[in-house]
Image (tube, rainbow, N blue to C red):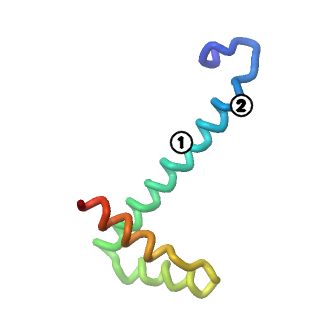
Amino acid sequence: CCFGWEGESPPTSAVVWSLCQVQVELHLCYINFRYTMQKRFPSILEVYYKSNEWSGIHGIRENDQITWLSSKN
């Protein structure tokens, strides 16, 4: 049971590593979703970017563009 930690808690490093992996996967999932939106529904993605900028969250558009350009190379 439980990846060999029967009756024990997993080491903290294993928990932290797992959480980091989940965050990376979620981040990539969101970037891929926005890339698809940019190709299929650019006006909806523009509303997403603008609403984040209006609420004070900046840099999402720029980070997406950098990620998409670097993945093409």
Residue at x 44%, y 54% (from the top left corner): 28
Q: Do the residues under discs 2 and 1 have CB atoms within 8 angstroms?
A: no
What amino acid type should be assigned to the residue bearing mark 2?
Thr
Which is nearer the N-term, disc 2 or disc 1?
2
Q: Which mark is residue 21?
A: 1
Q: Residues within 10 Å of mark 1 (few under 14, many from 20)?
A: few
Vertical placement of residue 19 versus 73, above or below: above
Instruction: Locate residue 54, reporting x and y percent.
Output: 60, 87
Q: Which mark is residue 59?
A: none
Instruction: Locate residue 60, reporting x and y percent.
Output: 49, 73
Residue at x 70%, y 25% (from the top left corner): 11
Vertical placement of residue 38 versus 46, above or below: above
Residue at x 70%, y 12% (from the top left corner): 6
Name the element at disc 2: helix
Name the element at disc 1: helix
Work out whether residue 14 or residue 27 is closer to the camera in this orientation and state it: 14
Left or right: where 5 falls relative to 58: right
Give the quarter of the image for residue 34.
bottom left
Residue under label 2, please give it: 12
Q: Residues within 10 Å of mark 2 (few under 14, many from 20)?
A: few
Give the CA separation, mark 2 to mark 1. Answer: 14 Å
Work out whether residue 46 or residue 41 is closer to the camera in this orientation and state it: 46
Work out whether residue 38 or residue 56 is closer to the camera in this orientation and state it: 56
Locate the N terminus by quadrant.
Answer: top right
